[in-house]
Amino acid sequence: MTNNSQEPEKFDAVKGGQLPAPFDGAVLGGIEGLYQRFAAGDEQVRLNAVVNSPTYGNQGLDILVTFLR
């Protein structure tokens, strides 16, 4: 019998990401993490994003240029 409840069950995947992660929380990787590091209030975190943006190829460099404007 199927459960028609809108609540997630024990093994259901749950979509997240409606709110940005707190900057003092776990650091995301990939392009999304790069965006968050550029938007951080901490200067050292932003500097780290500048240094690491070439790691993500052209997409990382495009983000770097966007934030430097």
Image (cartoon, rainbow, N blue to C red):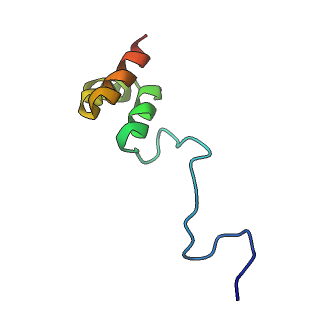
Residue 3 found in image quarter: bottom right
Q: Return the residue found at the far bottom.
A: 1
**Residue 22: x, y in percent?**
52, 41
Viewer-nearest residue: 16 or 58:
58
- Left or right: residue 40 versus residue 50 is right
**Residue 27: x, y in percent?**
40, 44
- Left or right: residue 55 versus residue 43 is left
Q: Is residue 39 above or below residue 2?
A: above
Q: The C terminus is located in which quarter?
A: top left
Label count reads 0
**Residue 6: x, y in percent?**
73, 68
Q: Residue at x 25, y 25 (%)?
A: 51
Q: Residue at x 24, y 33 (%)?
A: 55
Q: Is residue 14 above or below residue 59?
A: below
Q: The N terminus is located in which quarter?
A: bottom right
Q: Residue at x 37, y 25 (%)?
A: 46
**Residue 37: x, y in percent?**
41, 32
Residue 38 found in image quarter: top left
Q: Residue at x 42, y 48 (%)?
A: 26
Q: Is residue 45 above or below residue 6?
A: above
Q: Is residue 16 above or below residue 64?
A: below
Viewer-nearest residue: 59 or 44:
59
